[in-house]
Image (cartoon, helix red, strand yellow):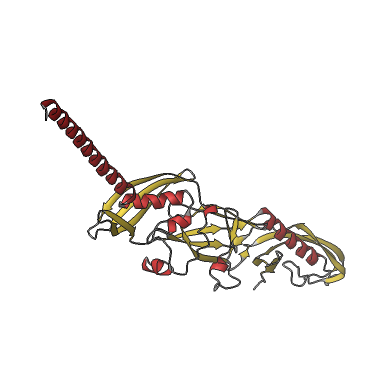
Amino acid sequence: MAVGDSRTLTRVVLLWSGIGVLLIAAFVAALGAVQRAYYSPTGFVSAFATSVAAHRLPEALAMPGAAPTSSALRAAGLSAAASRELLRADILPDIRDVTVASDTEGRDHVHTVVVTATADGRPVTASFRVRQSGSVLGMLPTWEFASTPVGVSRITVAHADDFRVGRHTVSPRAASPDQPAGAFSVSADYVVMPLAPLELSHASKYLRAAPVATSPAPGVVTETVVDAQPTHAFTADVQKQVNAFLDQCAAQKVLQPAGCPFGVEIDDRVQGDPSWSMVSYPTVELRPGDDAWETGQMVGVAHIDVTVQSLFDGTVTTRSDDVRFSMELSRVTIRPDGSLAIVVAQEP
């Protein structure tokens, strides 16, 4: 072989050797990138969080250890009977900027991965516990959640029967049917997704609750109260019924209208029928009691016109007096058909 041919062969060998080294380096780099992206604790959790952010809940809950099974919830100290009714994509907030903030390995080789994001523009965070479950080809580790990534929200609807989330009305009675039929407040446990606070409210003719957000956290029970308060229509309708009740009292031609909060006692002889009229009605202000709506003491003024004859000297006079009185509603409830049941407290 000529010297020139030998040198050419050497250059070719060196060239291909260099290419081989570059290919090996590229393969190793690619393998490292794949491992970081798909076969690392951060990659595993990031895939879960990204699925939640994209509202792909079946995909997220299909990841190893993510399914909210009864055993997984029980192992996390959560209610195994918690309702899955809120595990639906169409009620989730707009989740953006998903970022893995940290990855800490414990002595038990369980990694705690912290993820941050924004939900409807508000910052949210969640900590997930993952552990290695095996490997692919002995090189690429696979992972699973060491404890459930979902949380439970204990939702209480105070003074009403249901709450609103998105376009859906949800009844805690359906999720927890053992509650008393006449309970003034109802509550139930619901499985909720991390990084996805839900906005809850209540709106009906007589009751309205300002929106409140759940605070989901993996493996944690959080409390959320939907506090329903009287609407103007509720107060106005109760006021109307109180006024009608007092008008019926005023229609009675007696000194002491039966079952009514006002009346007078006269020692002299009454001539003819007394005549009552209302000067001012008590102002209704509803407040929650132990098991129904109620009011405090309300003050009103009635007026009586009556002719009396003195037992002392027989003179006849017309008495025309304002009579101040107080009354209280001890129980105001909304019947299933939407009508009101009102109980006037009786004087002791």
Residue lying furthest front: 1
- Residue 92 showing in the rendered view: yes
Q: Looking at the image, which is closer to me, 202 or 328?
A: 202
Q: Residue at x 37, y 60 (%)?
A: 64
Residue 39 x, y percent position in the rendering: 31, 52
Residue 237 x, y percent position in the rendering: 72, 58
Is residue 257 shown left or right of residue 285? right
Q: Is residue 91 above or below residue 337?
A: above
Is residue 105 shown left or right of residue 38? left
For residue 267, what is the image quadrant? bottom right
Residue 159 x, y percent position in the rendering: 58, 63
For residue 14, what is the image quadrant? top left
Q: Residue at x 37, y 61 (%)?
A: 65
Q: Where the N terminus falls, by quadrant?
A: top left
Q: Is residue 204 above or below residue 120?
A: below
Is residue 342 shown left or right of residue 132? right
For residue 6, what is the image quadrant? top left
Q: Looking at the image, which is closer to me, 152 or 346?
A: 152
Residue 12 x, y percent position in the rendering: 19, 32
Is residue 78 shown left or right of residue 310? left
Q: Where the C terminus falls, by quadrant?
A: bottom right
Q: Is residue 43 above or below residue 224?
A: above
Q: Residue at x 41, y 51 (%)?
A: 49
Q: Residue at x 15, y 31 (%)?
A: 10
- Residue 314 showing in the rendered view: no
Q: Looking at the image, which is closer to me, 295 or 238?
A: 238
